[in-house]
C-alpha cells in the first residue's frame, strides 16, 4: 500500500500569524502529515533572526498540539531544491508535496533549478484570503514540467508584514504575543496582555 503524501511547508513567518496556524491545521487535515520549518528566504528581508523565527514557529506548532504537524528545522535552506533533497533522504518512500503561498507562486520559476524541483515533487499553491491569485502564474510552472495544484484552504488574510509595521494582538496567536514582547520584536518593548480567547 502506498504511503500518504507529506506536505512540506517552509515559511519566513516573521512573525508567525493566525494565518500560518490555520494553514498548518488545514494542511494536516488535507494531507495527513506536515513538516514545517522557518525558512531563510534570500528574496525577503527578515526582522528577526532565523533561530528566533524557528523558536516562534515551534511555539506555534506546540500550541497547535497536533501530532500530524512537526517542526523539522533541519530542512531549512535558502535553496528549495536542497530542502527537497533533505526531505527525500529523511522520508525516502513518501510522496512529497512542496507547499507555497499564493504570493510565492510567481517566484518559483526563478528559483535555483526550479525545473528539477517541480519534476521531483508535487507543488501545491495556497491562495490567501483577500489576495487573489493570478491563474496565469501557474502556466510557467507547467512549462517547467510541474503539475501545480491549487489548494483552497480557509486561511485568514493576515500578513506578517502588517504585524511588523503595526503589531496587534488580534493578528498574532496569543501563545506568541508574550514572546514578541520578551524579545522586543517589531517595537514591542512594553508588557501587554494577550487577547482573551
Image (cartoon, rainbow, N blue to C red):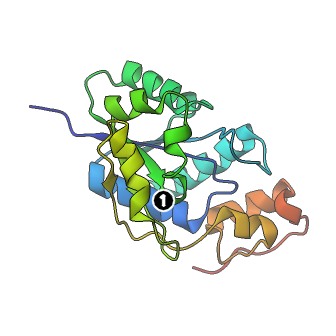
Tell me the residue that label 1 is attached to: 102
Asked if residue 179 is positioned above or below residue 87 in the image, the reply reads: below
Camera sees residue 68:
no
x and y percentages locating residue 45 in the rendered image: 76, 48
The number of discs equals: 1
x and y percentages locating residue 97 in the rendered image: 34, 41
Q: Quadrant of residue 34?
A: top left
Residue sitting at x 39%, y 18%: 89
Asked if residue 93 is positioned above or below residue 186 in the image, the reply reads: above
Residue sitting at x 75%, y 57%: 179
Q: In which quarter of the image is the N terminus?
A: top left
Of 12 and 137, nearer the camera is: 137
Of 12 and 1, nearer the camera is: 12
Q: Which residue lies furthest to the left in this view?
A: 1
x and y percentages locating residue 46 in the rendered image: 76, 48
Q: Residues within 10 Å of mark 1 (few under 14, many from 20)?
A: many
Q: Residue furthest bottom?
A: 196
From the viewer's perspective, tell me whether residue 32 is left or right of residue 7: left
Of 49 and 122, nearer the camera is: 122
Of 32 and 115, nearer the camera is: 115
Element type at mark 1: helix
Camera sees residue 70:
yes
Asked if residue 85 is positioned above or below residue 184 in the image, the reply reads: above
Q: In which quarter of the image is the C terminus?
A: bottom right
x and y percentages locating residue 91 in the rendered image: 34, 25
Q: In which quarter of the image is residue 162?
A: bottom right
Amino acid at each position: 500500500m502506498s504511503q500518504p503524501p507529506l506536505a512540506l511547508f517552509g515559511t519566513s513567518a516573521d512573525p508567525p500569524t493566525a494565518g500560518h496556524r490555520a494553514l498548518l491545521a488545514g494542511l494536516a487535515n488535507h494531507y495527513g502529515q506536515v513538516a514545517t520549518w522557518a525558512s531563510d528566504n534570500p528574496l525577503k528581508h527578515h526582522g528577526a533572526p532565523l533561530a528566533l523565527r524557528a523558536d516562534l514557529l515551534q511555539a506555534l506548532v506546540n500550541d497547535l498540539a497536533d501530532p500530524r504537524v512537526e517542526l523539522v528545522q533541519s530542512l531549512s535552506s535558502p535553496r528549495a531544491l536542497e530542502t527537497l533533497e533533505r526531505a527525500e533522504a529523511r522520508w525516502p518512500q513518501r510522496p512529497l508535496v512542496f507547499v507555497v503561498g499564493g504570493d510565492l507562486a510567481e517566484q518559483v520559476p526563478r528559483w535555483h533549478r526550479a525545473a528539477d524541483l517541480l519534476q521531483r515533487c508535487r507543488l501545491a499553491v495556497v491562495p490567501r484570503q483577500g489576495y487573489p491569485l493570478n491563474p496565469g502564474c501557474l502556466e510557467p510552472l507547467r512549462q517547467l514540467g510541474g503539475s501545480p495544484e491549487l489548494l483552497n484552504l480557509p486561511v485568514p488574510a493576515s500578513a506578517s508584514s502588517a504585524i511588523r509595521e503595526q503589531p496587534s494582538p488580534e493578528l498574532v496567536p496569543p501563545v506568541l504575543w508574550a514572546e514578541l514582547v520578551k524579545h522586543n520584536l517589531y517595537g514591542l518593548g512594553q508588557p501587554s496582555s494577550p487577547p482573551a480567547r
